[in-house]
Image (cartoon, helix red, strand yellow):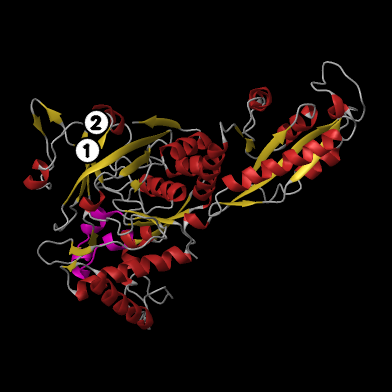
Amino acid sequence: MSKSCLDVKLNIKPVFCLFSHKYYYEGPCRMTGGDALQPGFDDVLNAKIVKGVMADLRASCPDDACTLLESAAVTATDDWDIDDGFLEKLMEDDVTADAYFVLTLFGADRVWREFGRKCKKPLIICPNQWNPMKSAYLFNIGAEVYVPYDWPEVSDYLKALRARKALAEANVLLVTRFGDTMALAGADDSFISLEQASATFGTSFRPVNFHELVEQMKPLTAEGNTTTPGRTTPNLTNDDLAELDAYADELISGAEECDISKEHLLNSLKAWKIVNKHLDAHDCSGCAIPCPDLCSTRRLNDEKFTFCLNHQLNNERGIASACKYDIAATLTMMAELCLSGHVPYMANTLPLVESQGSVQWLDQIPEQDRSAIEDTSNLYCVNMSPMMRKVEGVEGPVGPYAIRHFAYDQQFGAVFHRDFNADIGKTVTLARFSGDCRKLLVVKGEIVKGYGYDLHNCNGGFVFRVSDGYRLYKEQAKVGLMLPLVFGDITRELTLLAETLKLEVVSV
């Protein structure tokens, strides 16, 4: 079955390496006096420490992203004792645990050092001013260790590791025509090697043939499809068609405006449904489809549909779906979904260059929208049709939308449009994994003007401002054109994700 990356949970094992003095004495390892020197006092204090840390950890652990396993604690003493039982207890859930949250006390050094050597999972150290003495050893032995500055950063690290796990467990459906790593037209900036992408992110890829897919958009005959004669294939059924007919009525009635016929809307819904059948069959969490390569077959023209609506509807339910066969964008959107819970929007991301006293506006931005922007410094725009209807998250409500058509003359290819003027002043985060799997570009912007709500084809979007448009353009040139975005500021979370993936972060 298909699954959203949001369904993935990170299993966290809290472990405590504690220390207790067995005897009363004073000296250079005792930094207190009175009752605190008496045997048994440390045990009482340790219990309070564990209780307090667990309360802070529960408060910092995102319920929708993580599962806290039962904590484990061992106590070393000033006999400097250690045995295999300590490590067995700390690592009793090692098969289930994705990462360990570790608190260690002064004196339990031998225990946690041995734990650090034998544990091959990520180690998140409990926030504490004294941590550099502990964490330096773990870094020195090559352990995967993270040292949060404070409890909010604990939460961010957990989200980042959850996103990394989701990428590693993901299968991405590739609707192909030629079977190449890259499309023949567009997305030259995607991954240059899927093997390298799998090695970096852990993601697997599941190709299906476009021509077979198209023939499955109608009920199967006794003879089978012409591309696969005599074979049983997951064609749409009459029940599927009835379901889609009702859904088309629902979408039309919910739209502020609808410029496409129900017949053509149904064609796009059929494409969405058959893609979902393959997502289910291949246990996929994402999808990439090469629009120009498929367009040139003329089958989209003959069948009167595009895949735009498929991308929009699947992104809304947490299944990252990219056009132009932009597999790098698919994985970027998956990461953004995991870190924010918001619906991603993938679009051409273009600088509005201000030079020699004029602005290089995009032709699709109407004059009245251009003139409404007084400050034209550091402007960028996004322009593409697969807009989101939900801006408050995957679990949020559907906002106002129109249904437009992609094809100008024949008016097929359903697309949702949003009036982004309702979002002026809101923060967006844009990002992209580089094609060589070495970098993550992270950008924060603010929406200043929406445009193109009434346009058709692959048009519409918004203008936004960044901190340094010139620098962004120079960095974007090394990474790629389309910078998938989500509403809100997740720049810190993306930066930590890059740390867990050992990628260079480029922030603008």
Q: Is residue 308 magenta?
A: yes
Q: Does the magenta stretch include residue 270?
A: no
**Residue found at x 38% / y 82%:** 239
* Residue 188 seen in the figure: yes
- Amino acid type, mark 1: Tyr
Callout 2–callout 1 Cβ contact below 8 Å: yes
**Residue found at x 34% / y 69%:** 227
At label 1, counting other C-alpha atoms closer than 10 Å, the crowd grade (few under 14, some 14-19, many 20 or more) is many
Magenta segment: 290-311
- Amino acid type, mark 2: Gly
Residue 10, label in figure: none
Residue 380, label in figure: 1
Query: Viewer-proximal residue, 475 or 259?
Result: 259
Q: Judging from the image, what secondary structure is the residue with disc 1 in? A: strand
Outermost residue toward the right? 23
* Residue 307 seen in the figure: no
Quarter of the image holding residue 104? Answer: top right
Q: Where is residue 344 in the image (x, y as percent from the top left)?
A: 35, 51
